[in-house]
Image (cartoon, grey):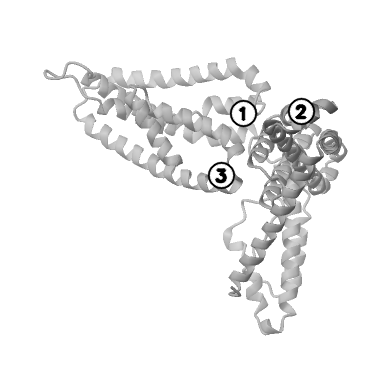
Amino acid sequence: LAISLVWGLFLVGDALHASGVLAVVAYGLTFASQSSSYLSPGVQHTMKEVWHLLEYIANTLVFVYSGVVCAYGLYSYELDLLHTGSVLLIYVLLNVIRFIVVLVLYPALQRLGYGLDWKSAALISWSGLRGAVGLVAAIEVSEFPACSATVQSHCLDNRFQEEVMFYMAGIVVLTILVNGTTTKHLVARLGLTKRSQASKLQHEAFVSKLNEAIRSRVSECRNNPELAGADWEVVWSFIPKLSAVGDSNSKPSNRREVVADPSLFLTAHAMQTNVSPSNQDDCLECNEDEAISEIRYRFLNFVKASYKHQFEYGMCGSWPALRLLNEAVAKAQDNLHQPLNEWDATLARYCSVSTSGWLNRCLQGHPSARAHIARGFDIAVSFVKGHEYAEEKIASLAKSLQVYDMICTESQAMVNRARTFISDVQSSYEEVAASIRTGMAISKTLHRTREVLDDMFSKAEL
């Protein structure tokens, strides 16, 4: 469906004598901004992988075709040093214009969306490669009917077509050779590749948990009579050595070393996982703002994971409720420099009820009012569960960075407002609340039934 829609938009744009390429780009921007709210994580992952493959194939075809067209055309182009100088001038002007645009919009970008800083702005100004989209547009121009003695309308001058293709190809080559090769050094110079200490501590916790699982599994295997006589030196050679600091300089050949004594291997793993990030040369100072933003981001990831789990198990009963919850998380992750406030910023407008007795009696019989209350109740219940889950999961990392109390205060303030709404619904709209609870119970029971059936089928019991 998504592929058909993209192709259809291109054809519609072309039929309306507009740019089909830009129509697809506009659709991509719109889809990317809304997909997290309308698509489940599993579908998002599948679509991402499929589109990355299609993108790779399309990019390859575009550049190969453009190269063939340019190589063929160079024999007929009457180009001189003036055209070459014009390409260089256009390239410089494009970089200057991009820098000016970013500079003018910087105050707004600094306060909206992701909160752009000056380092990211500098990178955006320099790394704006102009490739596939421009080449496709130039190919469209070159393939347009050329004016001739028999064709005088709805055509383009052949000289103009040649120059457009030449200039576009020249800009692409220059951006790849200059911007593309120097962006890596600019990123390193700006320090954008350095990981925050909060991120490193999270990585340490992951490595420690994984190593503990390895130790437990190996211990079980060594005590298993069926595995008696196994060569444990070979077993250990196949277990990767994990580094808590994410050392990317370790050679792949060193990751599988035969260790005679497994206990020494475990000791080495333990020493690696206890390495303090502060002893590393590439470690950033962990300031308070950085730590808080990092914890908020990871906290919201846990919240979103909880929403997905609740939906799959029938505890978040409606897809519209899940969409609104995910949308609230996405907006909060765009404003990590602000306190957590998904409830007031996004969800509160969907979770409001009247405490007036006569009005309640009027609304309870109205289908749209009942649907609104049911959706709000569903949102509030999932919201509370999600934040309780996230507070538990983030505790160890947040405490190590001394921001746990702040995060919990922000979360609990919202949870209390959600609980107040739940209490209001239960007291004023008992039938609606009971109906939702009944639906949750049915969904959870059916989900468990499906799990049992799947397990029986996998074991050939059915």
Q: Is residue 355 visible?
A: no
Q: Find residue 15 and report its image quarter.
A: top left
Which numbered disc, 1 or 2, marks the residue that appears first in the sequence? 1
Q: Residue at x 69, y 60 (%)?
A: 448
**Are dots 2 and 3 in contact, CB under 8 Å?**
no
Q: Is residue 181 above or below residue 93?
A: below
Q: Is residue 31 left or right of residue 456?
A: left
The location of residue 124, given as percent across then percent down, is: 55, 27
Q: Nearer the viewer, residue 157 or 129?
A: 157
Among the two numbered marks 2 and 3 on one chain, the one whose residue lies closer to the N terminus: 3
Crowd tier of the residue under label 3, counting other residues whose Cα lies within 10 Å: few below 14, some 14–19, many 20 or above: some
Circle on res. 362:
2
Q: What percent of the width, then of the height, locates residue 35?
A: 57, 37
447 or 408: which is nearer to us? 447
Of the residues shown, which amino acid type is indicated by label 3? Gln
C-alpha distance separating marks 1 and 2? 55 Å
Tally the marks.
3
Q: Amino acid at mark 2?
A: Cys
Expressed as whole percent of the image width and height from the top left, the position of residue 264 reads 75, 69
Residue at which label 3 appears:
44
**Disc 2 on helix, strand or loop?**
helix
- Specify few, some or many for label 1: CA neighbours under 10 Å numbering under 14, 14-19, or 20 or more: few
Q: Which residue is mark 1?
A: 120
Looking at the rendered structure, the secondary structure element under dot 3 is helix
Residue 462 x, y percent position in the rendering? 59, 73
